[in-house]
Structure formats: C-alpha cells, structure tokens
Image (cartoon, helix red, strand yellow):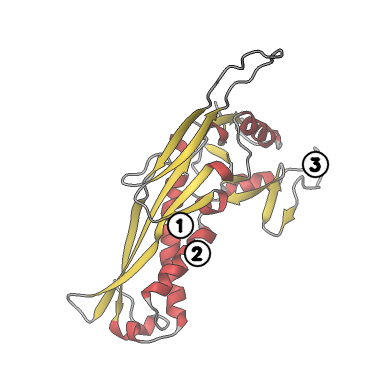
Amino acid sequence: MAMIHSTTADAFTPTDIGDLVDLAVKAKAVAARTGTVFSTDKVKVVFPKWVSDPAVGWYNELDTIATTDGTTGEVPCIPTKTAGITRISNELAEDSTPAAADLIGAGLANKIALAIDAAYLGNTTAKGPDGLLSIDYSTIDTGAALANLDPFVAARYAAIAAGSELTSWIVSPATAEAISKLKVATGSNQSLLQFVEDGIVVAGLPVIVSNQIDAATKFWGIPEEHTMLVMRKGTEVRRFDAVHNDGIDVRAVARLGLAFLNESGIVRGYDAS
C-alpha cells in the first residue's frame, strides 16, 4: 500500500512531522498524560532513588550524636525503539501545504502513542519497555463490581503509606461508564459523579480512560512524580527514495522508555477473587 497525491492532502517536511508527532504523543499517550515526560539525548538514564532517611535520636547535653546514613538506590531506563515506514508519491512530496504534515503526523503519532500505552499498561513487551503489570505495585480488592468509590479512597491512602501521592486514575471505558452511573443512594436518580470539562473526577483526581487497560484491572492509581516516560532526542522522521517506483519512504523512529521510581506507590484496583 502507498499514499498518492489524489487521495492525500498536500505535502510536508520531515522535521515538521517529527515535531508534530512529539507534541501529539505527549497530548494523546496515557503514559505522558499520567506520568512525567523526561527528555534526554543519552542512551541510558539512571534516576536516583531515596530509599530511607537517616536515623535521629534524643540526647542529653554533650552526648555523642550517632552518625547514621540514609539509604539510596537507582532506577535505570534504556529507551527502546518503535518505528514505522509510510510510502508516498513524489508528487505528494513535492507539493507544500501544511495539511499533509498534519495528516501524516497525526497517523504516526497515533501509532506511536498506542505502542507506548500498550507497553505502559501491559506486562513485558518484546524489544520494548516493561509496563505496570510487571512491577511490585500495591493492590486494592475492588470485588467483582464497583458499587461505590471506597476502593479509590483506599488506593489514595495506600499510595501515601507507600510514600507516593496519586495524581490520576486510569480506567477502561467500561469502568468509566460504570462509575459514572453510580447514584448517591439506592432508588435515587442523582448521579454520584459530575462530568467536568475534561471528563470525571474521582476521589479528587482526574480519570483518564484507555481501551488498552487489561480486563482484570478496574483502575490504576498513578503518582506522576514517580512515573517517568523517557523520550530520547524526540521523534526522528526521514525520507528515502523508493527503489522500485516513483515515490519516497517516510520513516519515523521514536526511542522511548518507562521508569517507575516507587513501585509500591502505584496502586492497582482489581477483583482479587
């Protein structure tokens, strides 16, 4: 398959598309919307981790104060590559209006964002980063169905106990619909939650909806400060002459990684039974 001039708006420059892809990925990807985006030009990033504080004690006058140390650790992250190629005609490539940049940039951004989130909300990804299901997260038993918002409240306090502050929830469309239909009391038609401009807020935190969350998970509670999406150098878009026809291949390459700086501060709500 290839894109041709008659079916596509006019053309673009690769640099413009690369910038568009990065902006769109940051706006669309659940990993970027719930975590912290960290940009680097290095092959590997190592995040420092403060594990425990030094000890203190009570002393009388002129007592010798004991020297104690804090405990530190680190979380390494090596961004890995996600890439794609689109073939277009030379007629399309030689024209010049921004519409094609928007079109192709949006398509590349969608694919890259989906690839990021599939890894982020999954377990392990071949040749890609390990996701939320692979870490030592805290858990909340929601039961088979969410009858109220108590599990979300419990999750906020579970994160605090583990040293994190949750900043958002990730739920599936089905869960989002279910909690949106909760009523203030049995027999009431008044909804427990109210829609705001960006969707719904549960236990004081915004809800992000993703259709890539696994079926067993009712929600993820994410602390932005301790969840990192590492983007290396930005998305690179290049074009090359096609060998067998009068066209060019547009190649997009993004190098991305995930790092979880306090695994137990991330909370998964699911039916433990």
Which badge, 3 or 1, comes first in the chain's sequence? Answer: 1
Pick the quarter of the image with the C terminus: top right
**Dot 2 corresponds to which residue?**
24
User: Residue at coordinates 25% horizontally, 79% vertically from top-left?
Assistant: 247
Tag 3: Cα neighbours inside 10 Å, few (<14), some, or many (≥20)? few
Tag 1: Cα neighbours inside 10 Å, few (<14), some, or many (≥20)? many
Which of the pair 174/234 is nearer the observer? 234
User: Residue at coordinates 68% horizontally, 44% vertically from top-left?
Assistant: 179
* Marks 1,2: beta carbons within 8 A: yes
The x and y percentages for residue 27 are 54, 61
Q: Distance between the residues labelled 3 and 2?
A: 38 Å
**Dot 1 corresponds to which residue?**
113
Which badge, 1 or 2, comes first in the chain's sequence? Answer: 2
- Give the amino acid at mark 1: Ala
Name the quadrant containing residue 244: bottom left
In the displayed structure image, the side of residue 75 where residue 174 appears, left or right = right
Q: Residue 184 carries which label?
A: 3
User: Residue at coordinates 22% horizontally, 75% vertically from top-left?
Assistant: 242
Query: How many numbered marks, from 0 up?
Result: 3
- Give the amino acid at mark 2: Ala
Q: Distance between the residues labelled 1 and 2?
A: 8 Å
- Give the amino acid at mark 3: Val
